[in-house]
Amino acid sequence: MKEKEIKKMFFEERTKTYHHTLCEAKKAHRFSYVWRVWLKDKTIIGKETVYAYGSSCCPVKMADEYIAEKIK
């Protein structure tokens, strides 16, 4: 899959909103639950939890690697 077709964003689970940065996503809700998502034509093709319960679950770089492996 070409990189230009894929849009990488953050999805905040509680507010159901997409954000360009992790900081924006964490500020969307007091108890935020944030996924790193890859979108293709507004459809989620891969996701990985990066922030939940007030702490980091997975670094963004590692989340991108996991998603890349899953969609191969």
Image (tube, grey):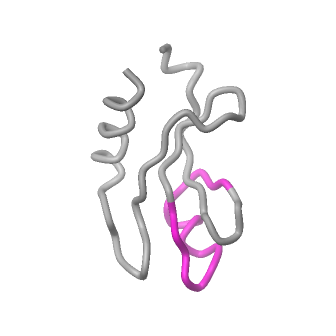
32 is within the stretch colored magenta: yes
**Looking at the image, is 28 positioned above or below residue 39?**
below
Quick one: 9 or 40, which is closer to the camera? 40
Residue at position x 49%, y 20% in the image = 3
Q: Residue 19: horizontal and vertical position, in percent?
A: 63, 55
Residue at position x 70%, y 59% in the image = 17
Q: Residue 43: horizontal and vertical position, in percent?
A: 67, 34
Is 34 situated left or right of 28 in this image?
left
**Looking at the image, is 2 positioned above or below residue 70?**
above
Residue at position x 53%, y 56% in the image = 21
26 is within the stretch colored magenta: yes
Q: How many marks?
A: 0
Q: Residue 49: horizontal and vertical position, in percent?
A: 42, 58
**Looking at the image, is 29 positioned above or below residue 60?**
below
Is 6 situated left or right of 14 in this image?
left
Magenta-highlighted residues: 18-34
Quadrant housing the C terminus: top left
Q: Residue 30: horizontal and vertical position, in percent?
A: 59, 85
Residue at position x 56%, y 27% in the image = 6
Is 69 situated left or right of 30 in this image?
left
